[in-house]
Image: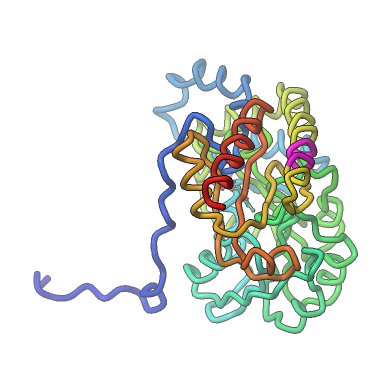
Amino acid sequence: MNATTPFVPRAGYAEIDLYAPRPAAMAIDLSDNTNRWGPSPAAVRVIAESASASLSRYPQAYSDALRFALANYVGAAPPSITTGCGSDDVLDSAIRAFGEPGDRVTIPDPSFTMIAWFARLNALAPMLVPLDADYDIDAEAMLACDGGTIYVCSPNNPTGTPATRERVEQLADRTRGVVIVDEAYAEFAGRSLVDLALARPNVLVVRTMSKAFGLAGLRVGYAVGNPELIGEVEKSRGPYKVSALAERAATAALTEDIPWMQRHAALVVENRERLTQALFERGLNPIPSSTNFVLLPLTNASTIADRMRQLGVAVRALEGMRPVSAALAASGGSTLRISVGPWEQLQAALDALDHARAECA
Ligand SMILES: *Cc1c(COP(=O)(O)O)cnc(C)c1O
């Protein structure tokens, strides 16, 4: 090996950057949609109890105990479930499993930005199709551009809005490829397409333990679908992706802490409606949400978010959003995304927002 031989990166990786690192966490951090009441207590207990027994051995290759607990949770048979290192890993594996290099992945816009990035990492071409003015998917436009996999996020990050079932069914009926439905926020939405994934050959619903169960640091995600689809995602994913501790902790959360999760999800819904109302009362124009965050179209969102951070509250500024609605056009595509937690934290966020807006006016 010649030490001067230049390293040549893979073609297509030149324009791919590392995922942007997030700023340091703050005491009141409403920036990343995690559970602001903390993690499932059963998961925490099981990690403390089982560390010495778990760490020196390999986990199960395909997480069968966790698969069983998830099957029970969603009302499916175990062969209809696969797991991964966060739902990001499941989404990445699915995109790779369902597309040949060069194929298209059709993605609504605005939506979850990681998907275009995963498409490019796997040498597929992301095709962005605008949401309609009600933030619903435009099924006809997505089918017109379709060349393989179609991604739908419902309810959608960052708009907080669901896709209508009929439109997802249209996609499933008419595409030659697979429809991936990302339900990271299903527990806050009171609706799900898991039944569609179990009834159709080409619908994969992807979900996570990161949001409602408060386990983002554990990295456990899963998918529900026809066993044939699930088998292909598992090939693509590879073995040993869920660590032994993660499998035990997530299984405990699903076995013991469903009531804990449901209680906090109900609080999210209550506080979300209260926050939305408080924003409307300020003459602002938040988008009514089905998730654990609220998107607020707002001019100068980055400046406002920086000032709020100085005041001790972290929220996420998202700029340059495609102006699919009148509210987004009015703000020039500039928005704040505020995660919903305990009311004291939301009140602090509202106070910081009022200060920042008064100063920036
Ligand atoms: C938070 C989120 C996820 C979850 O990612 P994990 O890798 O499971 O932590 C997936 N999809 C969307 C749209 C999200 O907002």
Q: Nearer the viewer, residue 341 or 259?
A: 341
Q: Residue at x 65, y 44 (%)?
A: 208
Q: Magenta span has 277?
A: yes
Q: How is the image coloured?
A: rainbow
Number of numbered labels in the structure image: 0
Residue lying at 69% horizontally and 69% vertically, measured from the top left:
329
Tell whether 1 sits left or right of 120. left
Residue at 71 percent of width and 82 percent of height: 145
Q: Main secondary structure of the magenta part?
A: helix
Q: Is residue 59 visible?
A: no
In the rendered image, the vertical position of residue 220 relative to residue 28, given as above or below: below
The quadrant where residue 335 appears:
bottom right
Instruction: Find residue 84 and report its horizontal and vertical position in percent.
Output: 57, 47
299 and 289: which one is in front? 299
Q: Residue furthest bottom?
A: 144
- Side of 38 relative to 145 (left or right): left
Q: Which residue sits furthest right?
A: 166
Q: Position of residue 270 (x, y in %)?
A: 80, 32
Based on the displayed image, in which of its 4 quarters is residue 144 positioned?
A: bottom right
Visible in this render: residue 167?
yes
Q: Which residues are magenta?
A: 272-278
Q: Is 17 left or right of 180, judged from the image as shown?
A: left
In magenta stretch: residue 274:
yes
Q: Answer left or right for 251 relative to 118.
A: right
Residue at image location 56% in from the left, 37% down from the top: 352
Q: Position of residue 32 (x, y in %)?
A: 56, 43
**Relative to the observer, which residue lies in front, 98 or 126?**
126
Residue 32 higher or lower than 14, as above or below:
above
Image coordinates for residue 252, horizontal then vertical, percent:
65, 25
* Residue 285 to residue 111: above or below: above
In this view, the residue farthest toward the left is: 3
Quarter holding the N terminus is bottom left
